[in-house]
Amino acid sequence: MKTPQEAHLYRRVEIPETFLNESAEQLWGGDIRIGDLTGDGNVDFLVYKSLGGIHPCFLGAFNVEGEPLWSLGDKYLEIKDADAADTNLKTLSPDRPGPVAIYDIDADGQAEVICFWVDSGVTTASKWELSAIKLMILDGATGDIKRCVVSEELQQCNAVAEGERHIPNYVHQRLMIANFSGNPQPQDFVVKVGINVLAFNHNLELLWKYTDRWFRYPKHSAYIPAVGDFNGDGFDEVNGGNFGLGADGTVLWDKYLGENIDSVLVEEWDGKKRVILSGGGQVLDATGNAILSLGFDVVPHGQEVRCGNLLPNASPNLVIRYNGHHPDLMVVDNKGQIRSRFRVDNSPNNTGLEVVRWDGLDNPELIYSPAALYDGEGNKVVTFPDLPPPTGGKMGWYHCFPADVCGDARDEVILYDPYSDAVYIYTPDPFVPNQYEGYQHTARQYNARLID
C-alpha cells in the first residue's frame, strides 16, 4: 500500500460574508461554479442559492482573493408555496447542482452567466414546476442582465409524468453547453427537466424540444444528458442514455438499454467520440448499438461513470461506481477487461466521481471520490490536509472541479461543500509559483458533471 501524498493547499478562498446565509448557527454559501468572469486570466467563483432548493434566486460573484465582484437577487427570498397552505418556499442551498453555467455564450470574448431565474414578482410558486422561471444571460464581470426571456415551453415543464411526480428525474437541472448551430464555438445549451429535453441558442430562442418516455425508476434515462459530436458531423449530439438526439433534435435512437442509466458521457474511446452509459458499463456507437457491454451482472447499478487515462499503456479507461450509492468502484481498460475493483471512503451520498490530471498530460490520471485521490489500481495516493470535515447531509460533502488553475499543465482540485463558507484549491507538490500562466476554461469545467 502506497503512503498517500499530502496535496499543497494553494488557496482557501472565503466566500464573501455578504453572500452567506446562516442556518443552525452555521454559515453557508450554496452551490459553486468556476470560470474567468472578469477576463483577467484568473479563476473566479460564483455562488448561488435557490428558492425551495430548486429555483435559482441569488447569485454572488467573487475572485480568487475572496473579494466580491457583484451580486444579484435576494438571499432571503420567500414566496408562498403553491403546494402547501400557509407555508412559504424559502431560499436554500440547492438540492442538486443546478441550472447555472459560466461560459462565453455570445462569443464576444468575455464570460457570461447563463441561468434559470425565479421571478421574484410572483406571489406563489411551486418547486415542482417552472411557471415562475425565466432564462437569463448576465455579463460575467458586472452581473448586468444582457438578455432575459420568458420561455413558455420551459415554464410548462414540471415533475409530473402520467399523473405522478417523478422527483429524481426533475431535480437534476443542469445547463450543458453545446454546438447545435454549427458556429465556430459552441453557442447553444440543452437542459433536461423531468421528461422534457429543451435546446436553446445564445439568444435564448428554443431550437427544439424532445419528450422522453423512459422516466420510471429504475428504467429511467440519464439524469443529466451529455453532449458531444459522436457521429462526426461537426455538430454536437445529445446522449440521454435510452435516447440519442441529433443537433436538430432528430431522434437517433429511442430504446430501453437497461436499469439505472444514471450517468452518461460523450468521450474518446477507440479513436472516436463515443456514447458511454453507466448502466451495464456500456459504450455505444452513433446509432445506439453496443461496442462494449460489461453486463448488468457486473454493473448492477451504474451510479456514476467517468472516462480517463487511468492505467499505463491501456487507455482510455472507464471508472464506474457500479453498485449504486456505495463506495464500490471498478476500473475497466479499453478492451473491456476489469483491471481493479476497490472501495473508496464513504461520503454522505457516495457520489462525486471525477478524473483528475494531477501529474500532467503524460502520466496516468487519478480518480477523485470525496475527498481523496486514488490511482487506477485503487490505492489512495493523495489526501487534502487542512480540509474541515464536511457538514453531512445528502449534499453536504466536498464537490470537485478539476481545473488547471496554476497554469502548469497539471490539474488543481477545487473543493467546496455547499453548506460551508469557503472554497479550497489544492495543487500538487512541489508548488512553483513562477510557473503560473493563467486559468483555462474548458468543457471539463463549464460542463462539469459534479454529481449524477
Image (cartoon, rainbow, N blue to C red):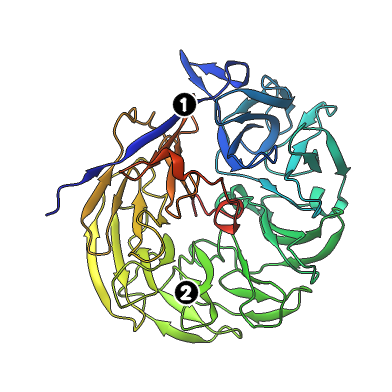
Residue 314 lies, with reference to residue 36, above or below; the image says below
Residue at the (55%, 53%) spot, across then down: 448
Residue at the (46%, 83%) spot, across then down: 270
Residue at the (68%, 43%) spot, across then down: 128
Residue 6 lies, with reference to residue 246, above or below; the image says above
Can residue 319 be seen at all in this image of the molecule?
yes
Task: Identify the residue under disc 2.
Answer: 258
Identified by mark 1, the residue type is Ser
Residue at the (57%, 66%) spot, across then down: 221
- The span from disc 1 to disc 2 (Cα, nearest Å) is 37 Å
Can residue 162 be seen at all in this image of the molecule?
no
Left or right: residue 310 versus residue 234 is left
- Pointer 1 and pointer 2: residues touching (CB < 8 Å)? no
User: Residue 147: horizontal and vertical position, in percent?
Assistant: 87, 43
The N terminus, quarter of image = bottom left
Residue 169 lies, with reference to residue 392, above or below; the image says below
Task: Identify the residue under disc 1.
Answer: 420
Q: Secondary structure at mark 1?
A: loop
Q: Secondary structure at mark 2?
A: loop
User: In the rendered structure, which disc, 1 or 2, sits on the residue that comes first in sequence?
Assistant: 2
Left or right: residue 337 versus residue 243 is left
User: Residue 219: horizontal and vertical position, in percent?
Assistant: 51, 67
